[in-house]
Amino acid sequence: MVFGRAFTLRQVVFGLFLAFCLTPWASPPVALALGLVLAQTVGNPFPARTKALTHKLLQFSVIGLGFGMNAHAAVQAGKEGILFTVVSIFGTLTLGYFVGRWLGLGRRVVHLISCGTAICGGSAIAAIGPVLRAKDEEMSVALGTVFVLNALALFAFPPIGHALHMSQNQFGLWCAIAIHDTSSVVGAAAAYGNQALGVATTVKLARALWIIPVAIGTSLIFKQKDVKVKIPYFIFGFIGAMLLNTFVPAVQPLGAPMVHLAKIGLTVTLFFIGAGLSAAVVRSVGAKPYVLGMLLWAVISTVSLYVILHTV
């Protein structure tokens, strides 16, 4: 009992883990691991709150990272990644369609997982779902598949990058193309280095803007009328912060503390994501969606890795 209030074991463990995520010793992979440990043992005592906070906290964290970016370097990174982005998005959507038919999965689930893999994970699924008029269970299956694979990528990519002696630029570009969700992209790149973080964030957010044309194309292909496309406005906040940091000298001293706060926010975001991946969530997805997600992820990861190592 603290200050006259009793706390459950789950709440105490949650509070201790969250407090650790606010310290300098925490990192995005460690935070995700703590969240997973919590989810698989005592459980998340605040599932609704962490789910609601995750999306907002990620958006504010991404905007904060913009205060550490230079617009000129970002334009260069964006130019380098545009061809990879276009080819990988349309290649993934096409491959997903045929693999999904082979597996016998529902058309909407296949499209949601393919869009999540091709563009930006949970954000793309959240935007495309209403356009498809997807059911709650279809959204849950797609989100569960993408989030589990995101967790694997966050742990696997940095060791692979070091083993292959990838440059900061190469690794940042690979993360932006081959990892689904923005949170895991930024987390993996941050673990590799600041330059990788800059490249990965810029290319990934440019990639996320493809939500808009893909959503419009989805509404036409699936013959959906009177639907609204959810635009990821936080990307424009990131661009605004980057422009302020580049062209307004008075703002530049704020860059370092803003980026520091953004990295803490990202660390907490990944803790919340891990805390939401309980064994029940993982099991509820079923085998076939994971097979689809794994095949798409394996193809986009290996092909993009080969191309980046030989061209960048």
Image (cartoon, grey):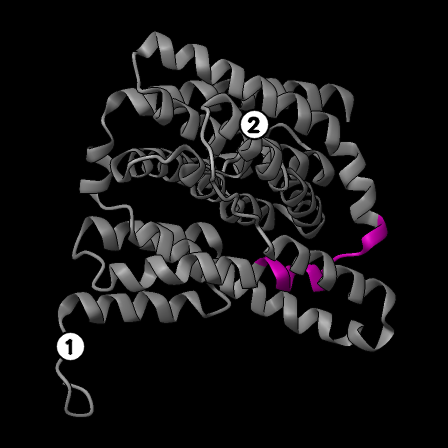
Please say if 36 is above or below 99: below
Q: Is residue 294 magenta?
A: no
Q: Nearer the viewer, residue 78 or 199?
A: 78
Query: Which numbered disc flags the more N-terminal residue, 1 or 2?
Result: 1
Please say if 94 is above or below 48: above
Bin the neighbour count of mark 1 within 10 Å (Cα to Cα): few under 14, some 14-19, many 20 and up.
Answer: few
Identity of the residue furthest to the front in this view: 226
Question: Residue at the spot x=39%, y=51% of the render?
Answer: 32
Q: Secondary structure at mark 1?
A: loop
Q: Return the residue at label 2.
A: 217
Residue 100, image x, y percentages: 38, 15
Residue 109, image x, y percentages: 35, 26
Q: Is residue 100 left or right of residue 298?
A: left
Q: Nearer the viewer, residue 105 or 267?
A: 105
Q: Return the residue at label 1.
A: 7
Tag 2: amino acid: Gly
Q: Which residues are magenta?
A: 62-72
How many labels were placed on the picture?
2
Question: Residue at the spot x=87%, y=65% of the render?
Answer: 247
How far apart are labels 1 and 2 at the CA level?
50 Å
Q: Secondary structure at mark 2?
A: helix
Q: Is residue 63 magenta?
A: yes
Residue 106, image x, y percentages: 31, 20
Q: Nearer the viewer, residue 53 or 220?
A: 220
Tag 1: amino acid: Phe
Q: Quadrant of residue 143?
A: top left
Which quadrant does the C terminus fall into? top right
Please say if 10 is above or below 75: below
